[in-house]
Amino acid sequence: MERALGFSKDCFVVPGSLQSAIYDTRRQDYALVSNRYAADLHTFIGKSESYVRAHMDPALLQFLIEREYVYFWPAGLLDRFADISMSYEAPFPLENAIIEGNDLSALEPLNLLLEAGCRYFLIILHDPVSPDELGRYLSTAEFRTIPTLELHLNKMPQARAGQLKSLVHKFPFISSLCVYNGRREQFFIKNQIPVAVTKKAFPGLASFKSPDTFFVNLQLFVESRSHNPYFHRKIYIGPDGGIRSSPEDPETHGNIHHLNDAGDIVRIVEGEHFRRYWNVSKDKIDVCRSCEFRYMCVDARLPLPRSDGSWYFADECAYNPFLCKWQWESGYQALVDCGVRSDPDGFQVDEEALEAVRQETWADIS
């Protein structure tokens, strides 16, 4: 039986304005190819091995085989490999909680959030806390069932490496620990948990993007196709107990200290206005929908609606998908300088101006 070209079911080609990304969700990695190569790839899937080897660019075929994106398989068996479902389902209306406060008392609502379904917690404390104080608090009953806890502490005077190692060893639910305003820079890994002490001040929850902040996995890929993974199933509790959909959302939806049980939290979260950003996927946001990284990027910027129902960001990303350039790379230009406009009045691309900039920057890419 003649073999035909198959494409791995756990790999996905995501086109951008100028190039495409091949997401390898099994290996949690990705590779970039030109849109022309991506289009060629699609035309060869299912074709016989003899045809593929005779007509496909040999360099492209070798690259795809080496990365195990494609394979030759008996033609009659290709349909035995089922497509992966793109349906996203979750057992609870909430999954992620950010709690920001001054001292350890800010963690009092944690039980309610656990009962409401939260499984991943990011804790930010601004007042000084000692390792012993933190350890005593984490030893209390409400922390026994917590799955994952990420800690950002603005100050921890006199904290020594041994004490921090002891904390992450004793409390396996700590997924990472970062202490700001430290006396010196330290970084180590204990039980596969990263621990950092920096002399820098707490920077806030920045939304700066770089390739280092991308995540390639099947859950994020599926979720990002229909939801905004930063806002989706998230709740933020501010220093005053105010409940918001995220730190970036200025609107408050009640106060955690005025609630009686987890059902009150669920009722707030199920409100349409609380969820208004949950389904604003990158495919609905101008500029982002032209980006090949859109299903691996968890973006904290607040989407803004236009009167016609379209969405945009007020702040420009560090990456220009129309040029495939990051701000720190040679040849980078802002959107407006290459003929792309995205603002409250609409989205428009001057194709002639954009092509001129592309030819100057990437003359060899088509």
Image (cartoon, grey):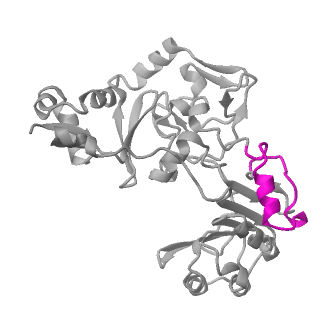
Front position in the image: 127 or 18: 18
> Is residue 230 depicted above or below 116 in this figure?
above
Q: Taking 11 as reference, is 295 left or right?
A: right
Residue drawn where x is 88% and y is 66% of the image? 257
Front position in the image: 301 or 231: 231
Q: Where is residue 164 drawn, in percent x and y?
A: 60, 82
Dominant secondary structure, magenta: loop
Q: Quarter of the image containing the C terminus?
A: top left
Residue drawn where x is 32% and y is 27% of the image? 39
Q: Taking 187 as reference, is 18 left or right?
A: left
Whether 273 is among the magenta residues is yes
Q: Where is residue 224 drawn, in percent x and y?
A: 54, 44
Q: Where is residue 193 drawn, in percent x and y?
A: 51, 74
Whether 154 is among the magenta residues is no
Q: Quarter of the image containing the N terminus?
A: top left
> Is residue 122 depicted above or below 364 in this figure?
below
Which image quadrant is residue 145 in? bottom right
Give the farthest residue toward the right: 258
Residue drawn where x is 60% and y is 29% of the image? 286
Bounds of the magenta segment: 248-275
Q: Where is residue 166 drawn, in percent x and y?
A: 58, 86
Q: Taking 296 as reference, is 179 left or right?
A: right
